[in-house]
Image: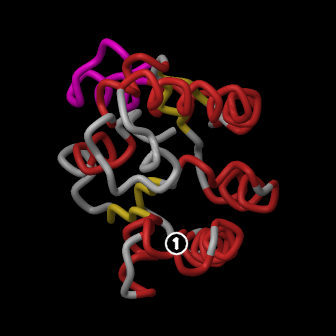
Amino acid sequence: MMGAGKSSVGKSLLEVFPSYKFVDIDSQIELDSNMPISEIFKKMGESEFRIMETKMCLSVSKTTNQIVSTGGGIILNPENVKCMKSSGIIFWLYADNETLMSRIKDELHRPLINTSKNSEEVLETITSIMDKRFNLYRDAADMIVNTSQLSVEECRNVIINEYERLKQCLN
């Protein structure tokens, strides 16, 4: 979900895994289309963006040794979830709605909230989105990390510990 810390924590993980590459699917879509996501939504619509997102997910999944940050809506397409599950461990960075609101309320470039005018409207939008996506996130995740009260570094450390634990379980 937007504001949970995916990009910040993903980049921070590179300090521990320096041989890995960080890939932000939304940033890569912006780069490839030469447009910010908000403009893609405006000019082409959300459905076209979701098609681009699926293509990028499939492309990214062909590479190893990377930390991938996805957009919050990637789980809306079961094909994306299948693709992600087949290519790595999925960590859902969860934050409660109020935390998400406080982190993103001033970020007008976010297409799903940019019509909201005040904190209350932003919170209503986030709550509505989370209500629709919560079960999808939960079902897709191999591990859930609540980032609401964690710093980027604390979240990174939780992920590293859980990643090591999961690796041991799989061996």
Q: Is residue 2 magenta?
A: no
Above or below, 64 against 152 in this view is: below
Q: Position of residue 153 (x, y in %)?
A: 20, 28
Above or below, 68 against 133 in this view is: below
Above or below, 44 against 117 in this view is: below
Residue 130 horizontal side relative to residue 39, left or right = right
View extreme (front): residue: 117
View extreme (top): residue: 149
Q: Which of 86/100 is in front?
A: 100
Tell me which colouring the rendered structure shows. secondary structure
Q: Secondary structure at mark 1?
A: helix
Q: Position of residue 133 (x, y in %)?
A: 70, 35
What kind of residue is marked 1? Lys
Boundaries of the magenta span: 146-161
Residue where numbered disc 1 is placed: 42
Q: Is residue 155 magenta?
A: yes
Q: Position of residue 129 (x, y in %)?
A: 63, 35
Residue 50 horizontal side relative to residue 68, left or right = right
Residue found at x 47% / y 31%: 93
How packed is label 1: few (under 14 Cα within 10 Å), some, or many (20 or more)? Answer: few
Residue found at x 72% / y 60%: 80
Residue found at x 64% / y 59%: 87
Q: Which of 34/93 is in front?
A: 34
Most common secondary structure along the magenta stretch: helix
Q: How many marks?
A: 1
Q: Dividing the image into 4 quarters, which one contains the C terminus?
A: top right
Residue found at x 50% / y 26%: 94
Residue 106 horizontal side relative to residue 146, left or right = left
Q: Which of 116/56 is in front?
A: 116
